[in-house]
Amino acid sequence: MWLEIVALLVTALFLWDHLKMRRQNKMLAAAGVRGPLQLPLLGNAPLFMLGENAETMLDLEKRLIDKHGKIVHVTMFQEFGVFTSDTRLIEAILSSQQTITKNRLYGLLHCWLGTGLLLSTGNKWFRRRKIITPTFHFKILEQFVEVFDQQSAIMAEQLYDRADGKTVINMFPVACLAALDIIAETSMGVKINAQRSPNFPYVQSVKVVSNMMAERFMNPLQRFDGSMRIFYPLLYRKLMKNIKLMHDFTDKVISERRDALQKSLNESSNNAPNAEEDDVGSKRRMALLDVLLQSSVDGQPLSNEDIREEVDTFMFEGHDTTTSAISYTLYLLARHPEVQARAFQEVREVIGDDKSKPVTMRDLGELKYLECVIKESLRLYPPVPMIGRQLTEDVVLDGKLFPARTNIIMVTYLAQRDPDFFPEPDRFNPDRFSPANVSNIDVFAYTPFSAGPRNCIGQKFAMLEMKSTISKMLRHFELLPLGEPVKPVMNLILRSTTGINLGLKPRVY
Ligand code: HEM
């Protein structure tokens, strides 16, 4: 009797699963999208959960793409989706206004970033994007060059202790503190001294939360607030405590800057001395948040909470990504001495031989070969190796009809190593981006900053920061190929399980 009831229940479950998945399975099959065999109810969960882990994820995706084609259909329980390295499909998704909604994986960042620019969708995203775009204007970025230079100088200064030509240095944590100093000073206008005082509570919290987010990304039981609260209550409490500390810090900075702005407006209306100058008469630098404080939507200023979402988004998007890019580029330079020699020669010609001379916006613009080096590094090791979307309706993309609710993961890490678009794809060759060759690169085959309406708003900021920190390192040190090679792993951003290692020797010239 019991056996019969169980058999009936199992049959009913299988039938329910089959009916629920039938429409999307049929549509994806009709679109010619294939994938590994799916089990009833479980889908492809065993494939991802048995014998695979975070470290093998990029490799697993490559194996599946090699076997099933550049668009692969996978299902986890009843979540279904495709991952793809197909340039034409990536083009169709990134260029469409219809496919701007992020997939559910991004939800884990919600408790920190709210619905700031990275996570919002629809009208809110559209309005915010319009307001925030001028924040990254050339004139604003120009004043940040001084910050990039000063913080890079501190990074170099602190590395001399270990620059003996033998010590293996993992660049990731070093670059991370410099990137944190830079993004805090440029987005909030405050010095947090992460490099000199890494134990400052706000710095600690950003590091703790960034690492916990990376962990959540990898662990299905931590991925959603509800399941994390049940299965990891202590970790969840720790996460919330640190997020609160960061929110309190950002709130305090925003109110202080709002008061300061109000004061300077009052002073200028009373004809006081130039309100943009500080007490000693030097020009005050605008932080990104100052620009937001002066913005309005339909005549209404943004609230402190609106601004906090955006400042927190800058803090998150603007430090781990550049850390990854700076570390990987230095690593590649260390392992390609001929490229390093050419980049150093250019840096010397443009900036000169005085190591203490601050770099200018003009200098950075002239570092053309270094730009090719950075672009090639972003091709091989994109800090954001996958970009996700969820379809909110049935959509035709590159001539194929995809069903609503499809999760899409664009694996740019693999697309940017596709031999159909990049000959000798694994070779580090900055000349691909030289003026003579760059027009051969398909715009949608190379998308480290994404593309289309939701591309990275901080792209120019990031390029200036990277040029500044990397040129500073080249001016001070010869980079040596020491330590274990990298093993790239997607852990929210691209990291390496072995560290991103090199050695340093002071340059004499
Ligand atoms: C090398 C460094 C960087 C890389 C490779 C990078 C890459 C990306 C990518 C791929 C996206 C699209 C993400 C997606 O759709 O899921 C993105 C979005 C974004 N990035 Fe960056 N980023 C970098 C630096 C920065 C910096 C320095 C900032 C801010 C100061 C920033 C702010 C943002 C914001 C706000 C978005 C959301 C834009 C929107 O949805 O409208 N990023 N970035």
Image (cartoon, rainbow, N blue to C red):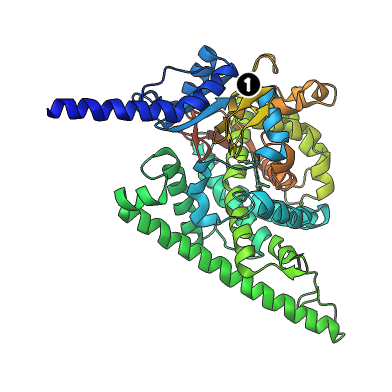
Element type at mark 1: loop
Q: Quadrant of the C terminus?
A: top right
- Asked if residue 416 shows in the view, the reply is no
The residue drawn where x is 75% and y is 22% is: 432
On screen, 203 above or below 427? below
- Ligand 1 lies in which image quarter? top right
Q: How many marks?
A: 1
Image position of 445 with respect to 389: above or below: above
Name the residue furthest bottom: 270
Query: Horizontally, is 281 left or right of 178 in the view?
Result: right
Image position of 362 (left or right of 2): right
Give residue 81's position: percent from left, percent from top: 52, 29
**Can you say whether 101 is above or below 312 in the image?**
above
Percent x, y of residue 209: 46, 53
**For the view shown, which residue lies furthest in the left direction?**
1
Does residue 101 lie above or below 138 as drawn?
Answer: above
Foreground residue among 385 and 508 = 385
Quarter of the picture holding the N terminus:
top left
Q: Nearer the viewer, residue 453 or 199?
A: 453
Give the quarter of the image for residue 146: bottom right
- Residue drawn 80% across the image and 34% down it: 368
Q: Residue at x 82, y 24 (%)?
A: 439
Q: Depth check: 254 or 477 in front?
A: 254
Residue 37: give x, y in percent of width and height: 42, 17
Residue type beneath disc 1: Arg
Residue 464, quarter of picture: top right
Along the horizontal axis of the image, is 279 left or right of 256? right
Mark 1 highlights which residue? 417
How many neighbours does mark 1 have within 10 angstroms: few (below 14), some (14-19), or many (20 or more)? many
